[in-house]
Image (spheres, rainbow, N blue to C red):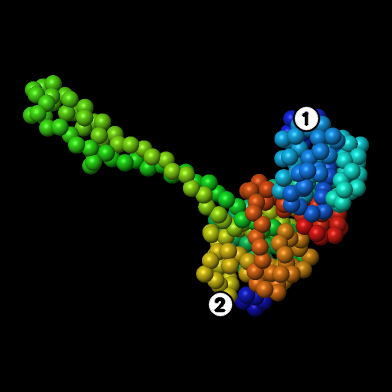
Amino acid sequence: MDDELQLPDKEVFEDPRELPRTGATILRLKSGRLDLEVFTRVFVNQLKLIKSEATKLCQQESGILVDNIDPKLAEALAGELRSLGEECVVVPAADLMMLPRPYPVHAVRLTRSGLSVRGTGEDWVQLAWDELAVLALGQVTFEEQTTRSTDSLLTRRITPISAMGGVGGAVGAAMAVSGAMQGRTTTTKSSQLRQLLDLVSDGGQQYYRIDGRHFDYSILGDQIGHSSTANILTFSRWLLSYSLKAWTNIDSKQLQQTGTCPIPSHSLHGLSDIAKWLLNLRKLGCPQTP
């Protein structure tokens, strides 16, 4: 308590994890979709992609544009991108920092020296403020499927045995009851929007993920709000106040001034890509313009 605070071209798009990382990687200096009319043509011409794959490349979520491709091709592509006003850098693919699987976090303690996180167990793991390199926040849609069985015996009318005649009628009635007892199965699909907060250490070895709907917000004290969205924004504001060197994908200035800011929408995999992209830009010392 003493210090506690409150693609089809195989040469280009073959899975880079299966290839020696001897190529080059292009990192954009900002994320977001590229203009389809302008950049689809560039990717078709430079990377020899079909139009649908070039369109996907324009729409990807993070600023890691292409990874582990031929260095000469990377330089040529980067040069054309810059000529069109899209700032980017080319780095050796072997130098790209990777991330492990995110470790789920359910509770956090804040101290003057840093934060401690706890997952499903009782152990706490420490992370110093000057080691917190990335804070990536995103709204992620989770698809859920629910299957229910309905016992139709309660609603289906069974003809009395006496009206069905003799033994045959009894057999028919038994079959009817059996069919009714089996019931019917219905499957419904729904989607749920959740806020996820990713925290990454400067070396990339520590990668933590907070699900806004499954987190202990009691740490916020009298600042706790009525929704997980408000609470995760307040908590993010606290973290960015203590870790001034952390890179983020949200408008930190607006968050500090107003207590709220837009939360970008990402896929689950896309949020991890954003965290990895920010980590590598920070490592390179690039200006932060996500």
The label number, if any, that marks residue 234 in the structure image: none
Q: Position of residue 238 (x, y in %)?
A: 67, 70
Residue 102 versus residue 245 in the image, above or below: above
Q: Position of residue 289 (x, y in %)?
A: 80, 59
Residue bearing mark 2: 222
Please tell me whether mark 2 sits on a helix, a strand or a loop. Answer: helix
Q: Nearer the viewer, mark 1 or mark 2?
A: 1
208 sits to left or right of 71: left
Q: Position of residue 136 (x, y in %)?
A: 69, 58
What kind of residue is marked 2? Asp
| Disc 1 from disc 2: Cα separation | 55 Å
* Quadrant of the rendering where the C terminus is positioned: bottom right
Res 17 seen here: no
51 sits to left or right of 75: left
What kind of residue is marked 1? Asp
The residue positioned farthest toward the top in the image shown: 168
Residue bearing mark 1: 9
